[in-house]
Image: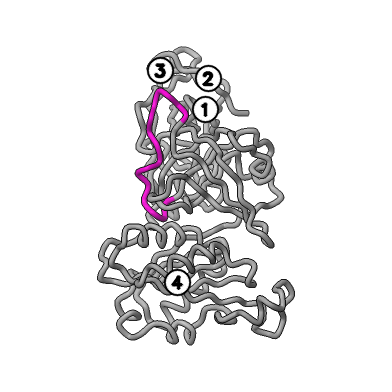
């Protein structure tokens, strides 16, 4: 069970010593921060309980010595310092000062963190017709009057953690991280996700306009490079297009002198997300080129696409492959571009193999972001 306490002093009681046996952990909440309290041979330590990789619940993981392992993707952290000891996580956890007073475990209240938690208001929900994808738009204005911080400082491509409240019995916890699919140049915060049959997603679906949610961020390094002399090639699959929406919108609004070529792969025409927006931006951004490809139809099947849509289709068929990339990239673009891959794990792996083995693109020119589908 999770304990929730209200802060009144620099140190706040979070548990009794009998609550956390040796080599065990417990999650507590202090001022909206989720904290993992650990007992290692009678000494107590505390670090953030939300994995900095993809938001996994560290307190539900395993503890070996001074290392806690995330149950989702096996990132490891040192409970004494919060430092990452094993990837895929790259960002450390915040570490909290702990005192034991009699039988009470106390944690020192921290000042403003690098990624403060704020409260945003849901403005609207938009369902993408013919798909299970929904976009959620929030006001940029923080509703907490004591802290007027907003997410205005995020970079295009970063993500944030959303605590929507009222989520119970979800095996992956009550918080999810989502790419901020809106550009910093837009007047709202938006994320887009597939609605699945999980307690979190069911709760998300029922949120009404005006609902306030807790948001922490931004985080992540999957952002557009700043050497605009080097083109950017985006390889997206399905919902993995969300970070590319924000990058393209930002580059277009700021009139950045960077060439962007995006290969956007989807199952069928209906599942191409943000297509109208992308086409509109391509019309005003001379440096933007988008190649759409659909896998449905490569073998003559068009189950979900209307006949009129099929007849009007001018994009590619089939998965992104070597021939398709060489068809649209010239030698200079192939040799100088930075390649960004975002999509489900299987797509990410196949694209990395395609780039590194078939096209001989060095690893240092490839950036990846994995969508795990929750």
Question: Residue 310 placed where, x, y %?
Answer: 66, 79
Residue 205 coordinates in the image, percent (x, y): 67, 44
Q: Which residues are magenta?
A: 143-158
Classed neighbour count for the residue bearing mark 3: other residues with Cα under 10 Å, few (<14), some (14–19), many (≥20): some
Which residue is tagged 3?
11
Name above or below for residue 298 compared with residue 340: below
Counting residues from the start of the chain, the first of labels 2 and 1 encountered is: 2
Q: Which of the 4 image quadrants contains residue 222? A: bottom left
159 relative to 341, above or below: above
Q: Are marks 4 and 3 in contact (CB under 8 Å)?
A: no
Q: Nearer the viewer, mark 2 or mark 4?
A: 4
* Label of residue 262 in the image: 4
Q: Which badge, 4 or 3, comes first in the chain's sequence?
A: 3
Lower sequence index among marks 3 and 1: 3
Give the CA distance from mark 4 to mark 3. Answer: 51 Å
Q: Main secondary structure of the magenta part?
A: loop
Front-most of 130 and 65? 130
Which percent across, then down, holds residue 68? 48, 42
What color scheme is it? one colour
Name the disc covering residue 5, or none. Answer: 2
Q: Residue 371's spot in the image, x, y percent?
A: 54, 59
Please determine whether, in this image, residue 110 is positioned above or below residue 104.
below
Q: Mark 2 touching mark 3, by CB under 8 A?
A: no
Mark 2 / mark 3, whichever is N-terminal: 2
For label 1, the residue is 29
């Amino acid at each position: 069970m999770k304990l929730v306490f209200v802060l009144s002093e620099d140190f706040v009681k979070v548990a009794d010593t009998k609550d956390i046996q040796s080599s065990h952990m417990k999650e507590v909440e202090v001022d909206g921060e989720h904290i993992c309290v650990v007992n290692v041979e009678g000494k107590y330590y505390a670090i953030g309980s939300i994995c900095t990789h993809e938001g996994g619940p560290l307190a539900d993981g395993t503890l070996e010595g001074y290392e806690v392992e995330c149950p989702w993707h096996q990132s490891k952290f040192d409970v004494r310092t919060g430092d990452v000891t094993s990837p895929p996580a790259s960002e450390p956890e915040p570490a909290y000062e702990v005192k034991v007073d009699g039988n009470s475990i106390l944690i020192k209240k921290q000042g403003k963190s690098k990624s403060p938690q704020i409260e945003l208001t849901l403005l609207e929900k938009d369902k993408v017709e013919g798909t299970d994808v929904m976009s959620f738009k929030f006001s940029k204005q923080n509703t907490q009057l004591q802290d007027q911080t907003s997410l205005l400082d995020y970079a295009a491509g970063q993500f944030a953690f959303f605590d929507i409240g009222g989520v119970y019995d979800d095996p992956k916890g009550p918080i999810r991280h989502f790419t901020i699919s809106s550009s910093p140049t837009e007047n709202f915060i938006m994320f887009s996700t597939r609605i699945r049959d999980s307690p979190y997603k069911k709760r998300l679906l029922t949120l009404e306009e005006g609902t306030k949610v807790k948001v922490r961020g931004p985080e992540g390094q999957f952002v557009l490079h700043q050497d605009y002399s080097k083109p950017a090639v985006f390889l997206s699959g399905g919902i993995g297009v969300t970070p590319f929406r924000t990058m393209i919108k930002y580059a277009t609004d700021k009139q950045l002198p960077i060439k962007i070529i995006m290969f956007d792969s989807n199952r069928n025409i209906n599942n191409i997300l943000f297509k109208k927006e992308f086409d509109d931006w391509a019309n005003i951004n001379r440096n933007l080129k988008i190649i759409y490809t659909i896998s449905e139809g490569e073998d003559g099947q068009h189950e979900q696409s209307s006949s009129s849509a099929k007849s009007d289709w001018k994009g590619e068929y089939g998965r992104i492959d070597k021939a398709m990339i060489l068809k649209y990239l010239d030698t200079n673009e192939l040799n100088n571009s930075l390649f960004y891959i975002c999509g489900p794990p299987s797509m990410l792996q196949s694209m990395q193999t395609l780039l590194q083995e078939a096209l001989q693109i060095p690893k240092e020119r490839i950036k990846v972001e994995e969508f795990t589908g929750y």
